């Protein structure tokens, strides 16, 4: 086996190949944990610590769907080999299976402009695209009639949905509010400009006393101590059993955070 392995490595080295950078896709507000291409290469899906799943069109690089049904980190994504079925797995102990609607998929791919990164800068058309991605396309007309752009979207309340937009269904109003709250959280993270490695995976806030756990990840000391004290002997990032509950101060990361704060608080 060793000889075969060496021979294969040698052959690969002789043939050689070149990797050319293509693009960077953004959309998550926390580290991405999993990626997968569709069987035809036309879509890419990614799962993240922010608990969301994003489906991209690999040709236009537009976001086709944002799925937010999981309640904990999304750790795995997989397409069926010959059909448009997607499975997403999460630390919430569930696997969700999604079947793509070819009609709505075609509509999403036909959108010419991808929404701007910062929601407060979205136009009315960007908001319409976002509604479609959230499964709320029936509200597009209502939002357009009331000229809801990004700023208006972020300022929506239960009262404005009922009184101004005349959305009678309580369940629908609550769904919109949940989606808007998720968007506010994402906007806050994007506008803060805080590097992801400075954010505690548990609290999603800037770390003050970072420590390294036995899973190799860094966390806010108090948050990780609370995690362990509740008899959670698994890693918040991998869901695997921690080999040790010893927490080691990450002095290098703390110094980097302090330098970043000194630069950005002037």
Image (cartoon, grey):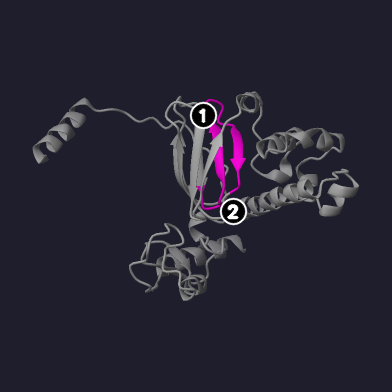
Residue 78's quadrant in the figure? top left
Residue beneath label 1, please? Answer: 84
The residue lying toward the viewer, choosing from 72 and 58, is: 72
Label number found at residue 163: none
Q: How far apart are marks 1 and 2 (CA)?
A: 36 Å
> Where is 160 relative to 220, above or below?
above
User: Does 36 appear in magenta?
Assistant: no
Of the numbered discs 1 and 2, the one sitting upstream in the chain is 1
Residue 11's quadrant in the figure? top left
Q: Give the range drawn in magenta.
A: 48-69
Q: Tell me where residue 258 appears, x and y as whole percent.
A: 51, 67
Number of residues whose C-alpha sits closer than 10 Å to that of mark 1, classed few (under 14), some (14–19) or many (20 or more) = some
Q: What element carries label 1?
A: loop
Q: Tell me where residue 132 appears, x and y as whole percent.
A: 69, 35
User: Does 61 appear in magenta?
Assistant: yes
Q: Is mark 2 on a helix, strand or loop?
A: loop
| Residue at 57% in and 54% down | 71
Q: Tell me where residue 122 appears, x and y as whole percent.
A: 72, 39
* Residue 10 falls left or right of residue 174: left
Q: Tell me where residue 106 appears, x and y as whole percent.
A: 62, 23
Residue beneath label 2, please? Answer: 193
> Where is 41 relative to 180, above or below?
above
The residue lying toward the viewer, choosing from 130 and 150, is: 130
Q: Which of marks 1 and 2 is in front?
A: 1
């Amino acid at each position: 086996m060793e000889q075969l392995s060496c021979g294969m490595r040698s052959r690969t080295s002789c043939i050689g190949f070149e990797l050319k950078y293509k693009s960077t896709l953004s959309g998550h507000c926390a580290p991405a944990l999993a990626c997968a291409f569709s069987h035809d290469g036309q879509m890419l899906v990614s799962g993240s610590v922010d608990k969301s799943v994003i489906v991209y069109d690999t040709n236009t690089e537009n976001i086709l769907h944002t799925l937010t049904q999981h309640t904990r980190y999304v750790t795995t994504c997989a397409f069926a080999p010959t059909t448009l079925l997607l499975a997403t797995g999460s630390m919430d102990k569930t696997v969700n299976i999604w079947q793509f609607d070819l009609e709505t998929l075609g509509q999403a791919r036909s959108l010419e402009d991808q929404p701007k990164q910062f929601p407060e800068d979205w136009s009315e058309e960007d908001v319409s695209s976002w509604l479609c991605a959230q499964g709320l396309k029936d509200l597009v007309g209502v939002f357009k009639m009331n000229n809801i752009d990004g700023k208006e979207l972020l300022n929506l309340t239960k009262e404005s949905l009922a009184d101004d937009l005349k959305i009678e269904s309580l369940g629908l109003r609550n769904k919109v509010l949940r989606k808007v709250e998720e968007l506010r959280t994402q906007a806050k993270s994007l506008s803060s400009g805080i590097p992801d490695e400075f954010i505690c995976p548990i609290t999603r806030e800037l770390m003050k006393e970072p420590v390294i756990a036995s899973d190799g990840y860094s966390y806010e000391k108090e948050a990780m101590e609370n995690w362990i004290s509740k008899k959670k002997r698994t890693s918040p990032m991998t869901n695997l059993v921690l080999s040790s509950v010893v927490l080691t101060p990450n002095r290098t990361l703390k110094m980097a955070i302090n330098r970043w704060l000194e630069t950005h608080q002037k």
